[in-house]
Amino acid sequence: MNGAEIIDGKAYAAGLRARVAAAVPAFRVAAGRAPGLAVVLVGEDPASQVYVRSKHKATVEAGMESFEHRLPATASEMELLDLVERLNADDRVDGILVQLPLPSHIDEKRVIATIDPDKDVDGFHVVNAGRLAVGEAGYVPCTPLGCLMLLKDRLGDLSGLAAVVIGRSNIVGKPMAALLLAENCTVTVAHSRTRDLADVVRRADIVVAAVGRPEMVKGDWIRHGATVIDVGINRVPGAEPGKTRLVGDVAFAEAAAVAGAITPVPGGVGPMTIAVLLRNTLVAAHRRAGVALPEGAIG
Ligand code: NDP
């Protein structure tokens, strides 16, 4: 018997996308142009192609300008850096996203470092990581910001709550921890060297799992009534031969029996990522154009 409320990330993301879209016409009037997002894809990685297509579709649906740039897998690092520089200089472009991973002959860090931090709507540039660390306005990676929105929507004030983030990557775990700290949570960051992980997780009011290991977090690790955010996206063999299915980093059924609320996989954190990307692009457009953001558009 499931006790937990299922956090509907798909519905929250749809609402956020609608609020972003509703703010675009006023921006067009004030700035004389639409907010613009440039997405760069290098090579033909099938998963990346799917992501880029859905980002393009969502951008257009929000009434924004989508600039898609595709380079062959053989493109040199210099060609890509030149393109990023051109996008930095292009006034119609408010946000630049270079789809990762890049082919192995290209230095990802160098490419991200070349993006203008004020157009870095993915929040991967070290300047934006630094701004988040010291509490200055910048751009926060989309997935952890989406997780925070779901948490605040469910719990309201997070102040004083014990939060455990499992995973310390630069794109999920570390920014998630910084965001929760800024909300006055008492934050523990766990990782592959953490001892007695189950005991650490049992102390948490909020658990964010961003590991990449199918169903690693068990139901008996979860404190009764805790809120569980499952970032993991893992493909595992399905019930029928040759078929696969998606599972998170949390053993959903077990955890849902004890948690107060939990995100499903799919339909939890996943849909938030693109919605927050549009939100970050809207924010970048307003900041760059010196136009005030309408209240309520971005929460
Ligand atoms: P990374 O592989 O970069 O990081 C994984 C983290 O998990 C590392 O910090 C690692 O520790 C830690 N870890 C690994 N094994 C264990 C273990 N046994 N116990 C405790 N911690 C462990 O992954 P990402 O952060 O990029 O992604 C995490 C998951 O989130 C993946 O499933 C990914 O697909 C998903 N994801 C989903 C997104 C979405 O839109 N919903 C967006 C981004 C990611 P250490 O540092 O010590 O190696």
Image (tube, rainbow, N blue to C red):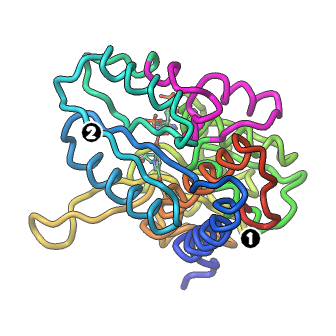
Which residues are drawn in magenta? Answer: 111-140
The tag on residue 70 is 2
Q: Position of residue 215 (x, y in %)?
A: 42, 56
Q: Residue at x 26, y 39 (%)?
A: 70
- Height in image: 295 above or below 92? below
Q: Position of residue 87 (x, y in %)?
A: 47, 32
Q: Is residue 224 magenta?
A: no
| The quarter of the displayed image where residue 131 is located | top right
Q: Residue at x 68, y 43 (%)?
A: 200
Q: Residue at x 44, y 26 (%)?
A: 86
Q: Position of residue 146 (x, y in %)?
A: 62, 56
Query: Tag 2, which secondary structure?
Result: strand
As shown in the figure, which amino acid type bears the numbered disc 1?
A: Arg
As shown in the figure, which amino acid type bears the numbered disc 2?
A: Arg
Q: Can residue 258 be seen in this snapshot?
A: no
Q: Is residue 116 magenta?
A: yes
Q: Residue at x 56, y 32 (%)?
A: 124
